[in-house]
Amino acid sequence: MAVGKEIRTKIKSVKNTQKITRAMEMVAASKMRKAQDRMIASRPYADKMRTVIDHLAHANPEYKHPYMQVRDVKRAGFIIISSDRGLCGGLNSNLFRKAVVTMKEFDEQKIEMRFCTIGTKASGFFKRIGGNISAQTAHLGDTPQLADLIGSVKVMLDAFDNGEIDQLFLVYNDFVNTMTQDPKVEQLLPIEPKEDAQLSHHWDYIYEPEAKIVMTQLLTRYIESLVYQGVVENLACEQAARMVAMKSASDNAGDLINELELIYNKARQAAITQEISEIVGGAAALS
Amino acid sequence: MAMTMHVDIVSAEEAIFSGPAERVFASAVMGEVGILPRHTPFLTQLKPGEVRVITPDGEENFYYVSGGMLEVQPHAVTVLSDTAVRAHDLDEAAAIQAKEEAERALQDKAAEIDYAQAQVELAQAVAQLSAIKRLRGRR
């Protein structure tokens, strides 16, 4: 029967699409679980780091590190963390929108900006809008490693050391839960001293070999760990967002298939009715 | 009971050890250090090497760290272990690579192809959407 051939092919193609989106949904769900584990595993380091940094802020170091000194902001740096692949709903565009809002404020204050992008989506976007990209890293895969980030972070830290930037921000997605991802702009440098420091207690560390070297290493590790944490968190967000996007795509495909099947059945029925009436009409004409 | 202190050994990718200990030995850049409870605040770099933790029941645990930091407070010791082998030259090389990658990405046309591809996909999606709308309208 030649009825509704186009509709049938269309149904078949939508079904194929649905199969793909459903598979992607399941893959994203399992990857998300792993990414969440990794996110939790990386937290103790950042927490401990923060404790040590807090101790440092409470202590009275004989040496004040540049990373802890606030200076006039003429140029700012951004480390933007995005996903490598699309099909994850509005995750990246929400993040970029947030970044653009912040950038606009800076632009009005005539502050120059430099970017370091992590993930192909960010480098594509910032290249298109004509941003000054000084470093980039991409294709971190599902198991990002700190070692992959060292280079990009160092470029930005060096720029800070040389006075090429006076402030450094990290832009990433914060994983709240599976349904909610919160785009965030966080200041990395300079590290703002906490006001509640207990100044009554005067003490300092013994540094080996030397305060400057030890603190540079510690603060560098601190920034790296924050960036790493952002990357891991962003990965969990990406998988969660993809899972949700793919779920709604599968649902939409299901609705579409139902509708198409209804149309197809109606068309088929109409054809049968027509055929019968033709036969009956033919028989009546003969008798 | 002997005095103890809290010891944490963590790396950026995972927590390695957390618990009470009587003594901790680590190889710092200036030489091997042994830490007992109530040590004065102390901050140092670690060389690649082992960290030995002696727990209150006399057990001796060994951990290998590829460098990192050691922070000592009177009742707490924190080892912030590096996950990768770090050296100034290596870091420098990684930074140069990241910069080069940015420059290459700015020059090559690969991303533009990505953009063009995205446009084609968008056009397809729009066409499909309007087809669906038309189908719905016909019903």
Image (cartoon, coloured by chain):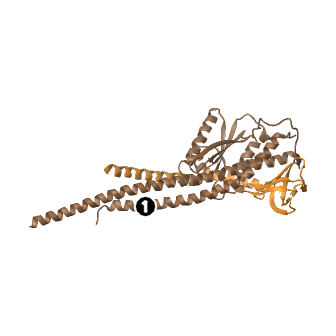
- Vertical placement of residue A8 versus A150, above or below: below
Residue A137: x %, y % from top left: 66, 53
Q: Amino acid at mark 1?
A: Lys
Residue A209: x %, y % from top left: 89, 50
Q: What is the display colour for chain A? A: brown
- Identity of the residue furthest to the front in this view: B1
Q: Which chain is orange?
A: B
- Rendered residue at 83%/55% (across/down): B20
- Identity of the residue furthest to the top in this view: A109
> What secondary structure is found at the residue carrying circle 1?
helix
- Rendered residue at 51%/52% (across/down): A245
Residue B123: x %, y % from top left: 44, 51
- Vertical placement of residue A175 versus A141, above or below: above
- Rendered residue at 64%/35% (across/down): A106
Q: Out of A147 and B72, give the one closest to the viewer.
A: B72
**Mark 1 = which residue?**
A15
Residue B117: x %, y % from top left: 50, 54
Q: Out of B1 and B82, give the one closest to the viewer.
A: B1
Q: Is residue A232 left or right of residue B78?
A: left
Q: Out of A108 and A260, give the one closest to the viewer.
A: A260
